[in-house]
Amino acid sequence: MTAENPKRVLSVDVARGLTIAFMILVNDPGDWNHVYAQLEHAAWNGCTLTDLIFPNFLFLIGASIIFSLQSRIAKGASRYTLAGHIVRRAAILFALGLFLALFPHFHLTELRIYGVLPRIALCYLCASLICLVTRKISHLALITASLLIGYWILMRFVPVPGFGTPTHDIPLLDQNGNLTAWIDRGFNNLTQRVLHTGHLYNQTHDPEGLLSTLPAIATTLIGAIAGLVMQLSQYTPAKKRNTLALGAILFLAAGEIWNLTFPLNKNLWTSSYVLFAAGCSLLGLSLAYWLMDMKRVQDKSSVARAVLWPWLVLGSNAIAVYVLSDFIVEMLLTIRVPNNGSVTSAWGWIYVHLFSHGHSTEMTSVAFATALVLVCSIPNWLLWRKRIFIKI
């Protein structure tokens, strides 16, 4: 943990803050039976607003990797030192994910090894090491394309033991018969035999599974390419904005075209989904860059400054806020309180008595989630006031 006032990219910090707030919002509704359609993941193929949140966070991590590496290299850090820092940070993120998966009961037999933080750790590790070796846009684009095309080939043409060949014996992206799900089950069976632990989020497959981490790394690398575009000294700010916006259009179109034969699917992190989500991220970043880094609306309007400030604060310690939200949720679900002659969780009691009053709706459910975001923001605001930015 360091107390400092580093030079930060405002548009990226604000975008990260908005993203982490939405991650908490969609993860923790008051009542899962009453959730607005766009605040839920698509059941299988397709894409909702919620499905765009996690890839946007990985995209922003990719951009931040470039800013961090360029800054450290400019200060004279060696590749060996940087590689050690990258591995250490990824290991801590992965360990945090496992800790939160076990907390508060620590039943090792039920540990879910996959998860949001483990995926972030793996994507950060691989993308950072790649960018440490090369930061040429053409090289990163080639690696990204190879990951996406290679993943499509695996999912489209490789026979799945016990099921057959996709599009011939089974439908493409069959929920239980796809290659990703088969590998996840095999890996989970291995950890059960060897480590006596492990389970999958959806029993037969996991949305943060092993093979689908490959296209997730591609998402992170696309963010790194965007970060490199924003760092190009020969580009004017207007040209940077236009390049990001043009990239958004191309990625959105490519994602929709590929969707015709390889459907958008967040659970499997399909290649078409990577392109479509990246297009949305590029569009959002280009708009944020134009408003905050070019127009400097926060310096010209007190209203704009007030609107942007909460997201800037959240974005400055995004991982800390996410970990805190998970910790609070687990505590609320674990603590038992009396409730009209019976016992319920603190979560249930708060929701019923302070929000739904016995009449749960989509509005009361999202109000509870919004309140949780506000609660998580308070400690982050205190860190911000003291200019403390938690660095792993």
Image (cartoon, helix red, strand yellow):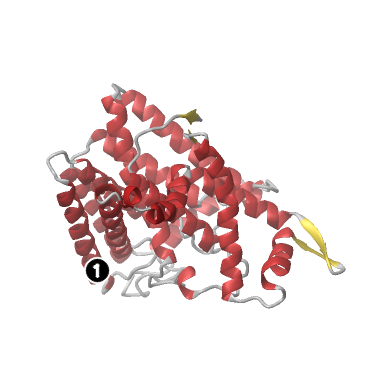
Q: How many marks?
A: 1
Residue at 40% x, 51% y: name it: 305
Residue at 24% x, 58% y: name it: 149
Is 221 placed left or right of 347 in the picture? left
206 vs 79, nearest the viewer? 79
29 vs 236, nearest the viewer? 236
In this view, which residue lies farthest toward the right? 341
**Label 1 crowd (10 A; few <14 / some 14-19 / many >=20):** some
On the image, numbered disc 1 is attached to which residue? 258
Q: Is residue 106 above or below residue 33?
A: above
Residue at 50% x, 39% y: name it: 384
Is 24 placed left or right of 222 in the picture? right
Q: Is residue 102 above or below residue 163?
A: above
Look at label 1 and name its amino acid.
Trp
The answer to whether residue 156 is visible is yes
The answer to whether residue 194 is visible is no
Q: Is residue 120 above or below residue 304?
A: above
Q: Where's residue 315, x and y in %?
A: 44, 47
* Secondary structure of the residue carrying numbered label 1: helix
Q: Where's residue 40, x and y in %?
A: 49, 69
Residue at 44% x, 29% y: name it: 4
Q: Where's residue 338, x and y in %?
A: 83, 62
44 vs 244, nearest the viewer? 244
In this view, which residue lies farthest toward the left? 234
Q: Where's residue 285, x and y in %?
A: 30, 54
